[in-house]
Amino acid sequence: MENDVVKSENLQEEVNLLREKLSDLATRLTSKEDKISELELLIKWYKEKLRLDAHKKYGASSEQSQGEQLGFFDEAEITADRKASEPDIEQITYNRKKRVGKREEDFSSLPVETVTHELLEAQQTCAECGEQLHVMGKEIRKELVIIPAQVKVKEHIRHVYSCRNCEKTRESVPVIKAPMPEPVIKGSAASPSAVAHIMAQKYVTYIPLYRQEQEFNRQGINISRQTMANWMVKATTDWLEPLYERLRKELLTNYVLHADETTVQVLHEPGRKAVSKSYMWLYRTSGDTAKPIVLYDYQQTRSSSHPKRFLSEWKGYLHTDGYSGYHSLPEITPVGCWAHMRRKFDEAISGMTPQECEKSAAQTGLEYCNRLFTQEKVFEKLSAEERFKQRKEQSQPVAEAFFAWVRGLNALPKSLLGKAVHYACEQQKYLMNVYLDGRLELSNNRAERSIKPFVMGRKNWLFCNTPKGARASSVIYSVIETAKENGLKPFEYLKFLFETIPNSTTGELDSFLPWSSSVPAECKSLR
């Protein structure tokens, strides 16, 4: 009996030990399965990122859908009747005057130099009968002639007059000087056209000063890049900065603005390393104004204190991207950018295979955004009041349905789709602000297009040397981009400013603004 009890106890111990081993084995298997699942998700994330990077490097940069196809939102596909017969086609034949070629249209504004090619008088006899030849027709060939930039020295000689009689009879002799225009930079050889040319070369065609220096040297002219930099900074400080401040004052009279920012490297900032990131902020008018203005503002940081200072005492709607620094500005209503929202879903699609993309949540999100932009094209030509009404009736319900749908998604936080979902939930309040006023726009693309010239230039000249140079660059870019927005040619407009502002006696700057009637016709673009 006693042996049976001992055996039973030993058997129970073995069972318990076996259970412990099985439990430990199950725990290990669960842990391995979890680890495998985690690794599978990590591999999927890396694949998404590799596909997205490849798309950014080699794929098309446009985020717009091809044509007007919008998946399940495509009303044309829904209402199409494939059984309907094609309409009868009536064939019409007629003659019409040959359209003037594109070359003639492109060259129509250029001066024409005519070169006539004729036979010598002795050659104007018929080789067969010896009679006099006559002109039976003409052949005309047009060619474009390029005259490289010409550089010359303009010497100003001012005559000084005095009275000989007073020289003999009086102690004081009146001296009268002939009038002469003031220079753009006193004590310098810089002319208005030279400074305007250097600025336009660097900030319009993105040619750095060292390349301009080389080009001048090839023409036998010794102008160092340091001299050119000094000319630009001095001319900007004296004449363009007051105009910039006048433009800023005019900018803040608008109730709807756009803002954006990008990085810039400034080598010699006090107390900062040369590799430190500084920022070029951009503020511009919206599409509801007849006086477009684009202003850049150089600052060392991305702090929200900079737009707060620049927009001090201003109230209105500010189009921005998702940067939170704009969201705390007092008396300002941030308006989010649906183009950024669409971009998130577009990136999620770029990280998928074609099989994964079909009927995916990323594709559905993109189609929601595309439908909003398609509707917006219809609203473009409407007045602000009518646009506000149509958006309330047609566009806002789509946006509300989008956010209701997106909040029901269960996406992995670190995946590209998860990032799109997070962005949508975080930015919903600001994205929906577009429906508060008919003057607002669905995206902040207007600001992105305006900051692009600076980004393109930065690829060539890479950095600014000093804060003073960065400040001058921001002012020059502002004047040039505002001129372009108003249909002016940058070089001609800058030349006009440097010729006239130094010789202005009133100090009034309104007559020099890009939309002023005082701006000469040669400054205005033909297109």
Image (cartoon, rainbow, N blue to C red):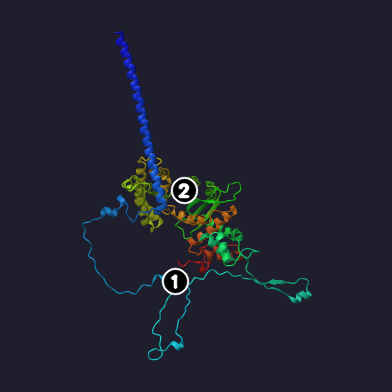
**Residue 434 seen from this side:** no
Amino acid at dot 2: Thr
Depicted 405 relative to depicted 498: above or below: above
Q: Which mark is residue 465?
A: none
- Front position in the image: 479 or 152: 152
Point out the residue furthest to the top here: 1
Q: CA distance from mark 1 to mark 2?
A: 48 Å
Residue 263 x %, y %: 51, 50
Badges 1 and 2: C-beta atoms under 8 Å apart?
no
User: Circle 1 — which element?
Assistant: helix
The residue labelled by disc 1 is 107
Q: Quadrant of the C terminus?
A: bottom left
Report if residue 88 is visible in the image.
yes
Q: Residues within 10 Å of mark 2 (few under 14, many from 20)?
A: some
Asked if residue 440 lies left or right of residue 272, the reply is left
Q: Which quarter of the image is occupied by the N terminus?
A: top left
Q: Which mark is residue 333?
A: 2
Image location of residue 366, percent across then percent down: 36, 49
State the image coordinates of residue 524 (x, y, percent, origin top left): 49, 66
Using residue 360 as the reference point, say whether residue 168 is left or right of it.
right
Residue 2: % across, % down:
31, 8
Q: Residues within 10 Å of mark 1 (few under 14, many from 20)?
A: few
Q: Looking at the picture, which amino acid does disc 1 mark?
A: Phe
Element type where label 2 sits in the image: strand
